Amino acid sequence: MAGPKDLDPSSSPRALLGAELRHVREKAGLSQTELGQRLFVSGSFVGQLEAGTRRMLPDIARMLDEVLSTNGFFGRNCAAAAKSRYQDHFAEAAESEAQATAIRQYAPLLIPGLLQTPAYARAVNRAYDPTTPEETVEEWVDNRMARVRLLDDPTKPMLWVVLDEAALHRGAGGRAVMVEALNHIAGLARRGRIVAQVLPLSAGAHTAMEGALKLMEFEDAPPLAYLEGVRTGRLEDDPATVTQLRFVFDLLVASALSQEKSLALIEALAQDYAHEEHP
């Protein structure tokens, strides 16, 4: 019997790999959990591979070929699915973000990527590496703006962001850049495209003081959490851990200003930047 055909890299390779994985897993009579046990990963991870919300990396592909006797199919084709315009530590999260139906995010230090303007993104990326050539910085900005276009859809994904007030006071790029950036967020909130809340400095100690958090939900795959640090990031798929991190986000929402007060603060800060009243 002939083996499965190699994939065309131009035709959504992750989705095709996931569909083929589901086909051969079911043909082998294995559940997602049973296959996960043989790969030393969770059943949720297998489900995310099948749904195309996770990248199939070479080591996983090799194990799949061995466990499912697929004659090197996944190993040959996973390279096409692994190509990304993003840095390695963020690539898988960005690709998952693009397929999410709902995103909940806490941003402690800067305006998050999906809400950035080109000028703000340029200032942030330039600060990340002051010695990077200008054309590289512009490439990074273009990649960031490609992510922003997710919000062109009027309803999906649902985006709920809790912005730390400290991020709004950090004048990345100067006053004019911050005026544009804050008015952009306010405009999205006023149009009902996003839910935006501000965690005020007056809230004091809170449940997410150790860093940024992003939670993603999908139509046909288990939820994911993304934890990010300096030039590093990690996707978390363990259901119990993701549930705990959802509780962390819920506590942040409870400590944050209401949507109305948050919008008023964002717009007031934009005015302060515009009139040079911001310290």
Image: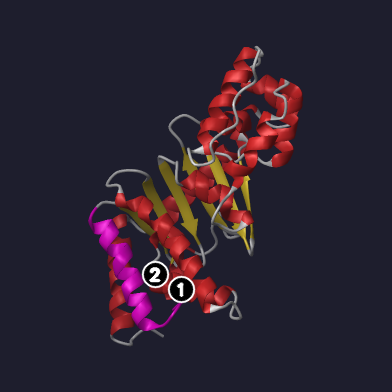
**Which segment did they paint magenta?**
170-191
Q: Is residue 261 above or below residue 248?
A: below
**Where 171 sits versus 221, above or below?**
below
Please give the name of the residue rendered at 35% of the width and 70% of the height, measured from the top-left corner.
181
- Magenta stretch: dominant secondary structure: helix
Q: Are marks 1 and 2 in contact (CB under 8 Å)?
A: yes
Mark 2 neighbour density, 10 Å: few (under 14) some (14–19) many (20 or more) = some
**Residue 118: image tag:** 2
Residue 183 forms part of the magenta stretch: yes
Q: Quadrant of the C terminus?
A: bottom left
Q: Secondary structure at mark 2?
A: helix
Front one among 3 and 174: 3
**Which amino acid, mark 2?**
Pro
**Quarter holding the N terminus?**
top right
Q: Residue furthest left?
A: 191
Q: Which mark is residue 122?
A: 1
Residue 110 appears in the picture as rendered = no
Q: Position of residue 161 (x, y in %)?
A: 41, 54
Residue 135: image x %, image y %?
51, 74
Residue depicted at x 44% and y 41%: 100
Crowding near the residue tagged with mark 1, few <14, some 14–19, many ≥20 C-alpha atoms within 10 Å: many
Number of numbered discs on residues: 2
Q: For residue 41, what is the image quadrant?
A: top right
The quadrant where residue 46 appears:
top right
In the displayed structure image, the side of residue 95 where residue 275 appears, left or right: left
Q: Position of residue 97 (x, y in %)?
A: 47, 47
Is residue 70 magenta-colored? no
